[in-house]
Amino acid sequence: MGAEIQTFPPEHLKERFDRIVARYPKRLAALIPLLMMLQREYQHITPEHMEGLATYLGTTPAHVLGVVTFYTMFSHRKRGKHHLYVCKTLSCHLRGAPGVIRAFEEKLGVKAGSGEATPDGEFSVDTAECLGLCEQAPCVLVDGQRFGNITPEMVDQIVKELSR
Amino acid sequence: MSIRETRILLSDIEHPESPTLDFYLSGGGYKALEKALKEMTPKQVVDEVTKAKVRGRGGAGFEAGRKWQFLPKNNTKPVYLTCNADESEPGTFKDRHIMERRPHLLIEGCLITCYAIGAKTGYIYVRGEFPQAQASLSSAVEEARAKNLLGPDILGTGVSIDIWVHTGAGAYICGEETGMLSSIEGGRGHPKLKPPFPAVEGLFRCPTVVNNVETLSNVPFVIREGADAFLKLGTADTPGTRIFCVSGHVEKPGVFEYECGVNLKDVIAAAGGVWKGRKLKAVIPGGASAHVLLPHEIDVACDFGSLAKAGTIMGSCGVVVIDDTTCMVETLQNVLEFFAHESCGQCTPCREGTGWARKIVTRIEAGKGTMADIDRLYEVADNFEGMGGKTICALSDAAAWPTKSYVKKFRQEFEEHVRLGRCPMKGA
Ligand SMILES: Cc1cc2nc3c(=O)[nH]c(=O)nc-3n(C[C@H](O)[C@H](O)[C@H](O)COP(=O)(O)O)c2cc1C
Ligand code: FES
């Protein structure tokens, strides 16, 4: 069990959690925004998070589990500190996404979409469906930051920039 | 013909200060809100928007004013506005530009709409992959709140409206309106059977209006300048402008705002035309769901009616341009991977059908398909096209339209894959 979450919500997130819950007439409506915060903070959603959230929002752990598995931005397995979403959809595909995905896989030694992170825990790679950034195809979203018009040759530089 | 942009939604987006409240106010921002709250009744606002015939920019083109009128009379429950900012239709990125560069325009549109429909709360559902748009909207909400343009007793009028930015977490189906409502309620993004329509029973089982970002962003113009000014733009079928998202094999991909009725061929030319001096092979005019058009079919006016007559849809206005070096079987494979992945799995024809279609097209692309597979692909798609009420939502239609049109219009290319036992575009 993660030592950081003896209490739920975690101390340092409590105030933000309460503020978000207050926006809705039903507490459960805060579920996805809160899961997004946990995912960002811990790079994965643990069973303790799910149980904690269920109690905090008045639902069952099973419901939370069902939601976690539905959305692509949540994961049970710990993702890399930098999780790359490489777009694979139409406009990006037309402008060379397959080569870009391969280049990231080769550079980092992990398979896209496998859920596996680099041994140092720094990186993981996912393919994503259209990121709504098609004018900059092919593109990547990582740490809330965007990189567009990527060529396989730029992959080294992007990884270097993220490692800084 | 070379064409000029008419920017009422994207005006000044290049200006570095464009997202700020001060900049927005200096261009007459929030004047429409003040006018609506101080000089108009909610009904007058609804009537004005109805008169302007603002058609839904999310894809289906339903008139916003008419939709608002579906709210039950003598209702005692709270009413909600939910703004659809899920923008996940492949090839679409217009809403993102509004939210990042002109967040106050959308917020003003939401506030006026809330007033019109009697909602005290509005939620903007922004897809999880848009952190910049979320941040831009959230700070704009706080700026507006600090200036008493949002929150309790707006501008001393006694009207109180709150707007909150709500995040999605990665799921195309949450762009379908009832899927979005399920998601805001804290569930899986499962669409629900209609009726009841959201206007009658939506968010938290209360009457709810769902509108797209671009739709709501037109409301300030309609209120400030009047419906007649809006009706002067565009065509009788689709008044106003639309933001065209041009991507794929063009020289200058990007967003371009034109009056509706602009010719599709000119839109592509204005985006620099086909890249690398290559020839045009196909155009998808309204997002990946749209029926594909051949080069000789793109001399067409872009409004809902004309594109429907041309056998496709205006949809989300995501224009994807495809050059002559592209394999259409591979392209369809890519599109079907998307739909098979995004099916929520509730309805058998969609869940199984999109998966089957993906498998068949993958087989053909790999050179392992048979001639019978080509017919099978078409038939499978014909079968999961849900218009006959086979499915809860229209995702399966969105998958069927490209499938059937690619097979029909590029049949020879599919057959060539079978004959050669490989993809002809990929060398021997
Ligand atoms: C599978 C599917 C996906 C959709 N995705 C979106 C979307 O991302 N954004 C959007 O505004 N509308 C989307 N829609 C349309 C919405 O259901 C709804 O019609 C729209 O938000 C209504 O707003 P409007 O009338 O202002 O266009 C989608 C519909 C379907 C069937
Ligand atoms: S297809 Fe990659 S961002 Fe749209």
Image: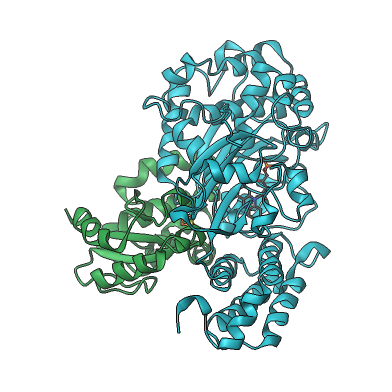
Whether residue B56 sits left or right of residue B24 in the image: it is right
Q: Which quadrant of the structure image shows residue B360?
A: bottom right
- Of residues A140 and A13, which is closer to you in this image? A140
Whether residue B422 sits left or right of residue B66 in the image: it is left
- Percent from the top left, x then y, of residue B141? 47, 29
Q: Which quadrant of the structure image shows residue A15?
A: top left
- Of residues B18 and B323, which is closer to you in this image? B323
Looking at the image, the residue that sits furthest to the left is A164
Vertical placement of residue B292 versus B422, above or below: above
- Percent from the top left, x then y, of residue B324? 53, 64
Vertical placement of residue B99 versus B145, above or below: below
The green one among the chains is: A
Marker count (numbered): 0
- Of residues B242 and B279, which is closer to you in this image? B279
- Determine the residue positioned at 55% across, 66% down: B338
Q: Which quadrant of the structure image shows residue A95?
A: bottom left
- Percent from the top left, x then y, of residue A50? 43, 62
- Determine the residue positioned at 62% across, 19% down: B159
- Determine the residue positioned at 68% across, 23% down: B222
The quadrant the N terminus of chain A occupies is bottom left
- Colour in which the image shows chain B: cyan
- Percent from the top left, x then y, of residue A94? 47, 62
What's the image's color scheme?
A: by chain
- Determine the residue positioned at 30% across, 66% down: A124
Whether residue B188 sits left or right of residue B306 in the image: it is left
Vertical placement of residue B101 versus B378, above or below: above
Q: Is residue A13 visible?
A: yes
Q: Is residue A72 visible?
A: no
